[in-house]
């Protein structure tokens, strides 16, 4: 049984009096420990696919199952289902330190403040953003925002991590390190489903699929790329 399964998923969107199909009978499976990339241009349906897969939006037709259970039948917060959603361009809380931002979801789930902060700092360290902990999100660069968004999504220990376009706006020299981080998360047993709008976003993944006009059309061959270390080894050279 796949950890995540989308079966014949259709999603419509209405703009004024016009309606269009954003997703057309999308079928997708993601296994634990697998890194899957969905490649597509803006307005191809890629972000909607992620939102439906994570339970943030319900499909108009078809079924989304997580760990064998229909997400439409879930109760409570979607995060309780073991799904983490990271959207780097939405990391913005005025005047709040990054560590507090990462801990917010834990506090909302009833975790004690001291434990929530400790877990937030642990995930910031895991994603290479420990130095960002005391800073407000407004002071972070694009790469740091990605790492902080991932830390928040990972803080509650999800089995599935959903990430929307993690390399967008990231400096070209930093993109490979972000992908290496996602690879390491998948290697730890977490299923990772991400979108990308560039060829580099399929480097090193287990599977890459293309989406166009709301249809998952083609499975592309992932480009093989060397893994870039997340941190210096301290050996010099």
Image: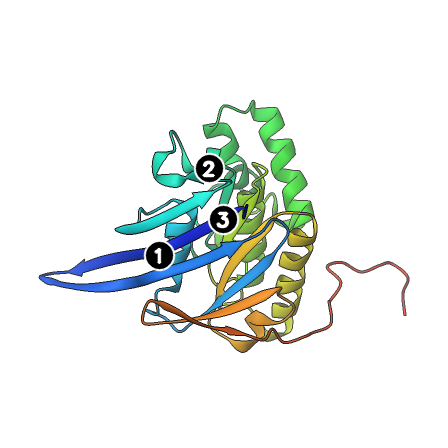
In the displayed structure image, the side of residue 2 where residue 59 appears, left or right:
left
Q: What is the CA distance from the residue labelled 1 to the residue labelled 2?
A: 23 Å
Residue 196: give x, y in percent of width and height.
Answer: 49, 68
Quadrant placement of the N terminus: top right
Image height of 25 relative to 172, above or below: above
Residue at point 62%, 65% (across, down): 205
Q: Are marks 1 and 2 in contact (CB under 8 Å)?
A: no
Q: Nearer the viewer, residue 220 or 8?
A: 8
Measured in 3D between alpha carbons, the distance from the residue under mark 3 to the one under mark 1, in whole angstroms, is 13 Å
Q: Residue 130 location in percent, x, y?
A: 67, 47
The quarter in which the C terminus is drawn is bottom right
Q: Are marks 3 and 2 in contact (CB under 8 Å)?
A: no
The residue located at (49%, 69%) in the rendering is: 209
The disc, 3 or 2, on the residue closer to the chain's N-terminal end is: 3
**Vertical placement of 93 versus 144: above or below?**
above
Which label lies toward us, 3 or 2? 3
Residue at 51% from the left image edge and 60% from the top image edge = 194
Which SS class for mark 1? strand
Kindly identify which residue carries mark 3. 4
- Measuring 54% from the left and 46% from the top, which residue is drawn there? 3
Residue 97 percent across, percent down from the top left = 53, 42
Between tags 3 and 1, which lies in front? Answer: 1
**Label 1 sits on residue:** 8
Residue 93 seen from this side: no
Name the residue tied to disc 2: 79
Q: Residues within 10 Å of mark 2 (few under 14, many from 20)?
A: some
Q: Is mark 2 on a helix, strand or loop?
A: helix
Viewer-nearest residue: 230 or 1: 1
Mark before the other along the chain sequence, 1 or 2: 1
Q: Residue 153, percent across and down?
A: 53, 44
| Residue 26 visible | yes
């Amino acid at each position: 049984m796949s950890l995540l399964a989308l079966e014949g998923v259709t999603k419509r969107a209405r703009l004024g009096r016009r309606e269009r199909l954003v997703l057309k009978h999308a079928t997708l499976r993601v296994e634990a420990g697998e890194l899957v990339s969905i490649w597509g241009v803006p307005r191809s349906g890629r972000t909607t696919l992620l939102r439906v897969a994570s339970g943030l939006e319900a499909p108009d037709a078809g079924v989304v199952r997580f760990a064998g259970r229909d997400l439409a039948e879930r109760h409570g917060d979607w995060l309780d289902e073991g799904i983490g959603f990271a959207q780097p361009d939405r990391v913005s809380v005025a005047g709040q330190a990054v560590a507090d931002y990462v801990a917010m979801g834990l506090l909302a789930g009833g975790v004690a403040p001291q434990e929530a902060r400790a877990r937030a700092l642990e995930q910031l360290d895991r994603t290479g953003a420990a130095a960002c902990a005391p800073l407000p999100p407004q002071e972070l660069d694009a790469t740091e925002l990605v790492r902080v968004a991932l830390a928040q999504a990972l803080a509650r220990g999800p089995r599935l991590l959903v990430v929307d376009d993690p390399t967008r706006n990231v400096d070209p020299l930093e993109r490979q390190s972000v992908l290496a981080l996602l690879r390491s998360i998948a290697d730890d047993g977490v299923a990772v489903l991400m979108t990308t709008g560039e060829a580099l976003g399929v480097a090193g993944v287990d599977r890459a699929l293309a989406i166009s006009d709301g249809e998952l059309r083609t499975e592309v061959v992932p480009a093989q790329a060397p893994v870039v270390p997340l941190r210096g080894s301290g050996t010099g050279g």
